[in-house]
Amino acid sequence: MDMIKAAIYARVSTDAQSENSTTDQIRECQAYATKEGWAIYGTYVDEAMSGSDISRAEYSRLKSDALAGLFQYIIVDDLSRIGRDMPEFTRLYQDLSEIGVFLIGVADGIDTSKPSAKIPAYFKGIMNEMYLDDLKSKIVRGLKGQVLRGYSTGGRVYGFETEPIFDPTGAKDRFGRVRRLGCRILINKDQADVVISIFELKSAGHGYKAIARILNNEKIPSPHADTGHFSGQWNPISIRGILINKKYTGVWEYNKSRWIKKRISSKRRAVPNKPSDWITYRSEELRIIDEELFIAVNSQIQSAKRKASPGRKKYLLSGLLKCSECGGSMVIQRSGQHYCYICNTTRTRGKSVCSSRHRIKRDEIEKVLLSVLISKLTEFGAFEKILKRARAIVQTQLEGHKPEGKNLEERKYKTETQIDNIIAAIEKGGYSPILHERLSQRESELTQIKAEITAAKVEPVQRAELTMEWLKDRLKQLGQLLNSSNDKASLLRNELSNLFPDSIKVQPFKAGNRVGFSFWGEARPFALVFPQKVSKSIIAVQGLEPRTRGL
């Protein structure tokens, strides 16, 4: 008789959870397997993983191996190690029981191979999930106490800093350090002056972008200056975030939302709490902006929000062009009578962050890029394949205009059969008002069907005759055709995204009294034309346009 095989699963929720370490769990499980005379198939361990996360790597591998029948038992120190999600535990219990794989909770004394284990197993599953609910409520309660004592609950707010407050009795924590009661929130004088300047600039009529440029030009560190990327520079989003933050008026609101996890992906999303559940702490000592200025500025913001346009138009190269100097996106901005592409970093954060200040006319760069693509298609010998596909598409569309002859004929035959049956019933059983009414309805339907058949008749479909000259002429008009239809432009924009997976780098430069530009990128020709991926570099393709006024 083959020896029974068992798998061991261990899990801890945090790195600091030493009192119930995976080593201790595995030791207890091995002792149980030895006592039963079972062979250990494998050990699965998830370190620092919450029991509510059902996408744990080792847990997922354990389930896969169990459902493949690689062992007969799963041994855990206690069932909470499996998880604290009751629906997931129920599914696992049922799926494993159906194929003869059972759970052993050593500390719980539960063996699901026994019929009597169902009630205690489900009860433990409920208790394990309720533990998390109880833990969440205790955390919220603790955070509320910290708030009411004027302590920070975590996170950084520009304009403020924290100061640790230690136990005056010198009591030690479990690591042997003086116990920290919390962190008192204080105003950071230098940052508070910047916050005041931002509100005053907005009150004077400056926009978000203008304020960001001013701060960047003055080399004032942003809230994220230590991140080492563009987030280390001031931008319109960070400016707006400060202007609408009530904390600068001494009003600190907590518990406005809660985080929940999706059961399948374990991704978190914020869910708003009821206003009655919010925790509000007011402190004049933490006020940076007076009430009158805060209300005036936010009234401006709300007024501008109501006047804002409903949305932005998508252009052919939207999201595809990148600034060669900083890597930021090139975006559309109106310049006089023209729409131009400009580096968004320069536009929103100023020339101190990116010095690429030139604008490139949208129609110019679109025309040059499309002409290059067409020339590359010619170089690859792709016209024959494109023409063949175009003929097939047009032929299919022409054939789509054929009458619904088959369906109409079937309906006609079915209705005529019903009429014959009704007439036979009348001849057999005599006249009936009901049969007469049904006969009239079917005859009316038959007349309508015959009319549809007559109306649907068309001339025989002709073959689609498309020439190489027609195709080349249409490609020359590609830009004009795309600009006449936003839907067509959207389709090609998606195709260009696939064609240039790493985007298109653009570099504007001065050329006398004009602005030139070059662009380059690795091109993968259309998948419909070439089944395999073919890479081709487009390098230093230049275009010129009249000089436009800088920023």
Image (spheres, rainbow, N blue to C red):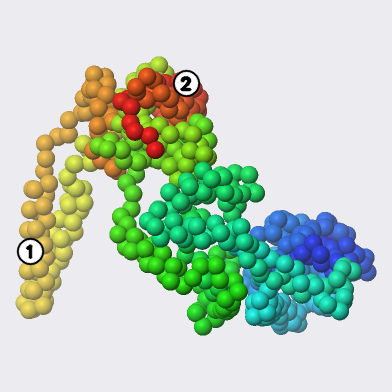
Q: Which residue is mark 2?
A: 539
Which image quadrant for residue 339? top left
Compared to residue 516, the image places residue 11 above or below, namely below
Residue 523 visible in the current orientation: no
Q: Position of residue 391 (x, y in %)?
A: 27, 28
Q: Nearer the viewer, residue 12 or 67?
A: 12
What element does badge 2 sit on?
Answer: strand
Foreground mark, 2 or 1? 2
Which residue is pictured at 40% across the width and 32% down the height? 358
Q: Amino acid at mark 2?
A: Ile
Which residue is pictured at 64% across the width and 80% down the height? 148
Q: Nearer the viewer, residue 528 or 91?
A: 528
Q: Residues within 10 Å of mark 2 (few under 14, many from 20)?
A: few
Compared to residue 262, the image places residue 393 above or below, namely above
Compared to residue 129, the image places residue 534 above or below, namely above
Which image quadrant for residue 518? top left
Query: Is 81 left, or right, of 172 in this rendering?
Result: left
Q: Which residue is mark 1?
A: 444
Q: Residues within 10 Å of mark 1 (few under 14, many from 20)?
A: few
Is tag 2's residue or tag 1's residue first in the polypeptide sequence?
1
Quarter placement of the C terminus: top left
Q: Position of residue 405 (x, y in %)?
A: 18, 47
